[in-house]
Image: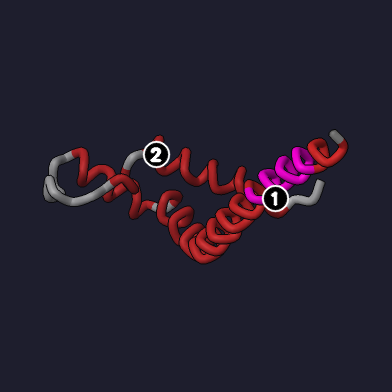
Amino acid sequence: MENEDRIERITEMEARMDRLQAAAAALEQAMDAWEAAQPDLEPLARYYASPLWREDFAADEAGELPAELKRGVLSEDGLWNLLDQVRALNERLWTEE
């Protein structure tokens, strides 16, 4: 019986280790991608706060841009929400508790 308990315990701990290793590897990859994307934050935030963004938004509203042009950056809510999400994530990641 004691050996069965030991085997069950080792099997459970091995499963926990496997899950933690997989999560750590995934997080490490995600952190590398996140850190690599950080230089995009400041130019994007500056663009959103600039007159150029408002001019581009107005041009889109006036139908002056090609229909096939990808322009999610001109979505007020989409860009605002992304910038807020990035701020919250950076705060969560880089603030010590």
Q: Amino acid at mark 2?
A: Gly
- Mark 1, residue position: 17
Q: Position of residue 9 (x, y in %)?
A: 78, 40
Q: Is residue 11 magenta?
A: yes
Relative horizontal placement of residue 58, taking residue 30 as reference (left or right): left
The residue identified by callout 2 is 78
Residue 25 percent coordinates (x, y): 59, 58
Q: Main secondary structure of the magenta part?
A: helix
Image coordinates of residue 21 in percent, x first then y, are 64, 54
Question: Residue at horizontal 70%, vertical 48%?
Answer: 14
Is residue 73 positioned above or below 4 on the image?
below
Looking at marks 2 and 1 on the same chain, the residue that comes earlier in the sequence is marked by 1
Mark 1: few/some/many CA within 10 Å (<14, 14-19, 20+):
few
Q: Position of residue 2 (x, y in %)?
A: 87, 37
Residue plotted at (49% across, 61% down): 37
- Secondary structure of the residue carrying numbered label 1: helix
Quarter of the image with the N terminus in it: top right
Magenta part of the chain = 7-18
How was the colour assigned to the protein in this rendering? secondary structure
